[in-house]
Amino acid sequence: MSIAAERIERLHALAREAAREGDDDRAREYVRLARRLAERNRLTLPREFRRSTCDACDAYLVPGRNARVRTQDGHVVVTCDCGHQSRYPYE
Ligand SMILES: [Zn+2]
């Protein structure tokens, strides 16, 4: 794993921690840093990262707190508090 990929993993963990503690602003900062790193190093963000973050506002999503999760037609639909929805196939 490259150094950049490791740093992204680390930022992901920090974002998750901050979000669980209710510090959404700090979580968002970590999410943005991780995105920027991925972009600069032409890395694809891990699937788990992509699924736990909002594409529109960079929030780290915690279902039941700042996101709603539903299943619909074989898809998982995640709605962020900002209103943005993302969907992916149910596995
Ligand atoms: Zn959002």
Image (tube, grey):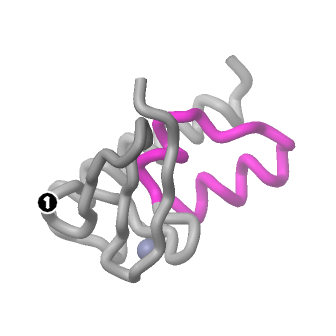
Which residue occupies the foreground of this view, 29 or 67? Answer: 67
Image coords of residue 46 (percent x, y):
59, 34
Residue marked by disc 1: 64
Q: Is residue 85 left or right of residue 25?
A: right
What's the magenta bit mostly, secondary-structure-wise?
A: helix
Which residue occupies the foreground of this view, 58 or 18? Answer: 58
- Give yes or no for residue 52 being in the magenta stretch: yes
Q: Residue furthest bottom?
A: 82
Q: Residue furthest top?
A: 1
Point 42% across, 32% down: residue: 90
Point 83% across, 43% down: residue: 41
Three-letter amino acid code at disc 1? Gly
- Give yes or no for residue 73 being in the magenta stretch: no
Relative to 52, say whether 46 is above or below: above
Q: Residue furthest front?
A: 73
Q: Residues within 10 Å of mark 1 (few under 14, many from 20)?
A: few
Relative to 24, say whether 4 is above or below: above
Image coords of residue 28 (percent x, y):
43, 69
Query: Is the CB of mark 1 within 8 Å of ligand 1?
Result: no
Relative to 15, say whether 81 is above or below: below
Q: Is residue 14 left or right of residue 1?
A: left
Point 65% across, 56% down: residue: 35
Q: Which residues are magenta?
A: 31-53
Image coords of residue 81 (percent x, y):
31, 77
Point 55% across, 34% down: residue: 47
**Which element type, helix, strand or loop, lies under badge 1?**
loop
Residue 19 occupies which quadrant of the picture?
Answer: bottom left
The quadrant of the picture occupied by the N terminus is: top right
Image coords of residue 9 (percent x, y):
51, 35
